[in-house]
Image (cartoon, rainbow, N blue to C red):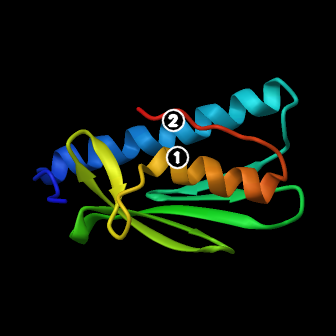
């Protein structure tokens, strides 16, 4: 699995789009009364807190051109490969992993759609 080369501007645009997509999905869940997830974003760091007080943290790593996800089940690093953010260990797509982690933390099926 070879990462797709990105300029710093491309990396910033792509990671901003990912964080914005996560935020808009959570806003829709709140509007539709799916689940109450508190979100807080500071620059390239987005913290999601679930009803049981557990957290998922998504943050950008500009020097590495990576996107990181951390939850109580582990930490994951993603590189941009052929149009998708892929786990550097097992190749799983970022939004699939995020959906799995959110479903675990939220104790219900939750799905994020990629950008």
Q: Position of residue 18 (x, y in %)?
A: 43, 42
Residue to which mark 1 is pinned: 96
Question: Could you say which is closer to the camera, residue 70 or residue 9?
Answer: 70
Q: Which mark is residue 21?
A: 2
Question: Could you say which is closer to the camera, residue 75 or residue 6?
Answer: 75
Residue 53: name its quadrant.
bottom right
> Measured along the vertical axis of the image, is residue 2 above or below residue 9?
below
Q: Position of residue 76 (x, y in %)?
A: 46, 69
- On-image quarter of the N terminus: bottom left
Q: Residue at x 27, y 64 (%)?
A: 62
Image label count: 2
Q: Position of residue 33 (x, y in %)?
A: 88, 29
Q: Which mark is residue 74?
A: none
For mark 2, give the secondary structure.
helix
Question: Could you say which is closer to the camera, residue 12 or residue 110?
Answer: 110
Q: Position of residue 65 (x, y in %)?
A: 24, 62
Q: Is residue 9 left or right of residue 51?
A: left
Q: Residue at x 59, y 38 (%)?
A: 112
> Measured along the vertical axis of the image, is residue 30 above or below residue 65?
above
For mark 1, give the secondary structure.
helix
Q: Residue at x 50, y 45 (%)?
A: 95
């Amino acid at each position: 699995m070879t990462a797709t080369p990105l300029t710093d501007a491309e990396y910033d645009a792509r990671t901003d789009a990912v964080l914005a997509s996560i935020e808009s999905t959570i806003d829709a869940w709140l509007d539709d009364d799916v689940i109450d997830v508190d979100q807080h974003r500071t620059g390239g760091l987005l913290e999601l807190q679930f009803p049981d007080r557990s957290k998922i943290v998504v943050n950008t790593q500009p020097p590495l051109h990576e996107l990181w996800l951390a939850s109580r089940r582990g930490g994951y690093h993603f590189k941009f490969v052929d149009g998708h953010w892929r786990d550097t260990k097992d190749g799983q797509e970022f939004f699939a992993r995020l959906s799995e982690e959110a479903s675990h933390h939220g104790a219900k099926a939750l799905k994020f759609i990629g950008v």
